[in-house]
Image: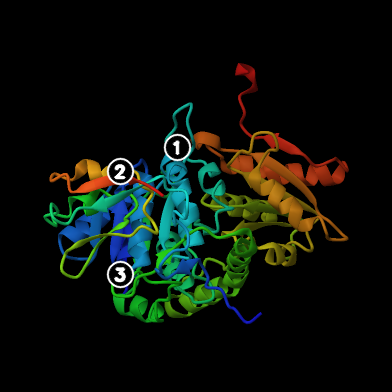
Amino acid sequence: MAQTLVINGNHAAAYGAKLSKVQFISAYPITPQTVIVERLAQMVEIGELNAKFIRVESEHSALAACIGAASTGLRAFTATSSHGLAYMHEMVIWASGARLPIVMPVVTRAFAPPWSIWDEHTDILLERDTGWIVFMAENNQEVLDTIIQAYRIAENENVLLPVMIGMDAFILSHTTTPVEIPDQELVDNFLAQESKRSFILDPNNPITHGSLTYPEWYMEFRYLLYKAMTDAKSVIKDAANQWAKLTGKYHGDLIDCYKCTDADVNMITIGSPSGDAKEAADILRAEGYKTGVIRLRVIRPFPSEELRQAAHNSKVLIVVDRNLSPGIGGILLNEVKGVFQTMKKQPLVHGFIAGLGGRDITLQNFISMFKRGYEILEKDEEPGIEWINLRREVL
Amino acid sequence: MSIKIPLTPISRPAIGASGKTGSWRTAKPIINYDKCKDCLICWMYCPESSIARTEKDKVLIEYEYCKGCGICANVCPFKAIDMVEEE
């Protein structure tokens, strides 16, 4: 029988790895991710999980060790955050180029300086072009469910790509909520497909991997990576639907459409702020505004078609970016603009930079952002970028 | 073209065409087998893996890959390797 535990997001991630029966874990502690691997270390130590756990001296090594383990056919797992992710960036690229189905939660956190341990999505979004499938979870249940789904997606023979799952620092990682833990047998059946690999390192059948590839071959390898990312869309949808059938838990597939199909003003969000956005949409709906939320559950492959479909009735799209690309604005804003650029009837796309470095984005802020969308529409304003809760008086 | 490439570049170990010294080596090591005790220290130190072990653990220099750096001659405790100018 499935049981419900009141646990934080980090523990939910650890349970996700445990239920996926990962065989190899390597880790270096970084706030606020540490608790994920601490819990897994405990599980391995007391025999709850039969896996090899190795401590390494850096995040670069943590992922390098996972690459080595996954190359021998093991199901590998690590977790990181912020500067740790930046430090392992080189290995992030190697893992996807090697087509290794590694799964890694990323507890999204701001960069220094100034030093910050709080929430921001810039770290994970900087990895969007590395060839990893990138999820953003809204709540602790989704963290657990997505880690299990991630192995099914990553190990699919048409995909063979590593997966990272973003979860908001402290808002998910350290906040306890009820999380339903599915039966081991159910997860075993869900992940029962044969684990695929692009190659296996075997001393009895030696191969070299990743050696120099001349210009007449390199592009084909990149095309295969690109194609796998495109093919991953149907595999992600299938995993989400199968999981929903088995457990009743459905968090959306590539996108999570909340009252979005008939909305005049749709808000585009990722991660945990989406819950507040949905609540704001409900409040405004009760007041007669036709508002909705499109949460991007997957950042790569980017859900372009799904987004167009979901927002084709929208007059205004409000993109909330808890991240910053200095010199252009929000990362998502520009990705979303690109999706709608080729449509004949384009919605107005207006961006907000909000909640950097753990700054609160309140329910009232979401209501204001929705209302600003209506204002832009009524006054026929040019859409742009605004900063929410910026303390202009100290600048 | 009928070649199908793998998903990620993999290759199998083979005798390499690269690394061959061709005609540019200026000195070559010659083993004096009267002095050689087959201790294999030269094999361990050779930076180009150009010293082979025969089945009977005899030392053999593979001149195709040897750069003539002289490290083997330097590390040999029995002074069994002479560096001779390449003809």
User: Is residue A63 rendered to the left or right of residue A388?
Assistant: left
The image shows residue A232 at horizontal and vertical percentages of 57, 70
Q: Quadrant of residue A57?
A: top left
Q: Is residue A172 above or below residue A255?
A: above
Which subunit holds the residue at mark 2? Answer: B
Residue assigned mark 3: A21
Quadrant (top left, top right, bottom left, bottom right) of the C terminus of chain A:
top right
From mark 1 to mark 2, how far is it between C-alphas? 58 Å
Residue at image coords 17%, 55%: B40
Q: Is residue A75 above or below residue A319?
A: below
The image shows residue A29 at horizontal and vertical percentages of 31, 44
Mark 3 neighbour class, 10 Å CA radius: few under 14, some 14 to 19, many 20 or more: some
Residues flagged by tags 1 and 2 on a common chain: no
Residue assigned mark 1: A118
Quadrant (top left, top right, bottom left, bottom right) of the N terminus of chain A:
bottom left
From mark 1 to mark 3, how far is it between C-alphas? 30 Å
Residue assigned mark 2: B70
**Secondary structure beneath label 2:** loop
